[in-house]
Amino acid sequence: MNVPLHLDAHVVSRAGSTAEVVHRRLIRVSEAVNERYGIVLKEAWTVLEEGRLRAEVQLDSCPAGALDASARVVEMLCELTLRLTPVRCRVLMSPTALPLSKRTAALQQGAKERLFLKAKDFPGDQDQILTGAFAGLGGQLWDWTERQAQFVRAVLRAGVVEATPSGEELHFVPGRKRREVAAAFGVSPSVVTECLQAAGIDRFRYQVWSASTLLASARSSSMSEV
């Protein structure tokens, strides 16, 4: 049985831009993310008023299986965040369509706890596990400068992790060569290397792997509860 995931994202920092400018940026970014990650989107990212976005994903839509789909969802949230930098969004993830009052309360709790992503209504202790997995990942994303975010996206243009043909394990996707990234941005390879080292790109890759695995596990737990 298919179990969708419901995603809400709210802007928590406009980085000095007006609400109108941020709204237009949200539309441009959501369109790009929808195009790239359409395979896992049951309902595409929709930009609402007051800096809000909503989407619904389906973890049984990837030919390589739910583990690969989970990796695509994690990468999608990272892509959304990186494209919006320095604008910041907080995310709510749930296996159920929560009423507005419950979504608002969960996001307020996430704001109080300064979380990147708040997981809500997963079975057992999966809320805490997923929230914790994304806390470190989001903290790193939010710490990056706009230039660091650009370089990381360029190096990992093909993705971060993907499932093996069996669909049972993950492996890292080879990154783009740094001299190619340097040429694209008109800087020296050493500038790219220093920037990526400061960003902690290797740590980021492992965090994406961990979050992807835990999301797939939470999805399995949700299915067992249905």
Image: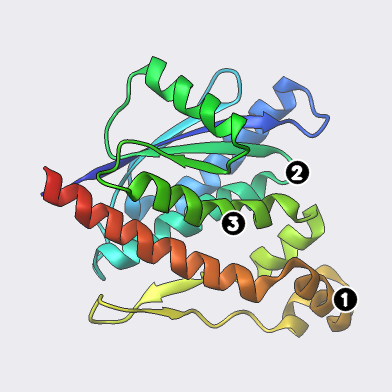
x, y (%) of residue 75? Answer: 49, 59
x, y (%) of residue 154? Answer: 67, 68
Mark 2 lies on a secondary structure that is loop
Q: Which quadrant, please, contains the C terminus? A: top left
Label 3 with label 2: CB-CB less than 8 Å: no
State left or right for residue 190 relative to residue 100: right
Instruction: Quadrant for residue 69, please give it.
Output: bottom left
Judged from this view, the residue extending furthest toward the front is 125
Q: Amino acid at mark 1?
A: Val
Note whether 110 is above or below 51 in the view shown: below
x, y (%) of residue 190? Answer: 87, 82
Query: Residue at point 68% right, 66% down?
Result: 152
> What's the CA distance linking mark 2 and mark 1?
21 Å
Mark 1 lies on a secondary structure that is helix
Q: Amino acid at mark 3?
A: Gly
Q: Earlier in the sequence, mark 2 or mark 1?
A: 2
Q: Which residue is mark 2?
A: 86
Q: Earlier in the sequence, mark 3 or mark 1?
A: 3
Query: Residue at point 24% right, 67% down?
Result: 65
Closer to us: mark 3 or mark 2? 3
Query: Residue at point 58% right, 57% down?
Result: 137
Q: Which residue is mark 1?
A: 191
Residue 136 — which label?
A: 3
x, y (%) of residue 40? Answer: 33, 52
User: How many numbered discs sit on the rendered protein?
Assistant: 3
Give the color scheme: rainbow, by chain, secondary structure or one colour: rainbow
Label 2 with label 1: CB-CB less than 8 Å: no
Q: Amino acid at mark 2?
A: Pro
> What's the CA distance linking mark 3 and mark 2?
18 Å
Could you classify mark 1 by the number of other residues whose Cα lies within 10 Å: few (under 14), some (14-19), or many (20 or more)? few
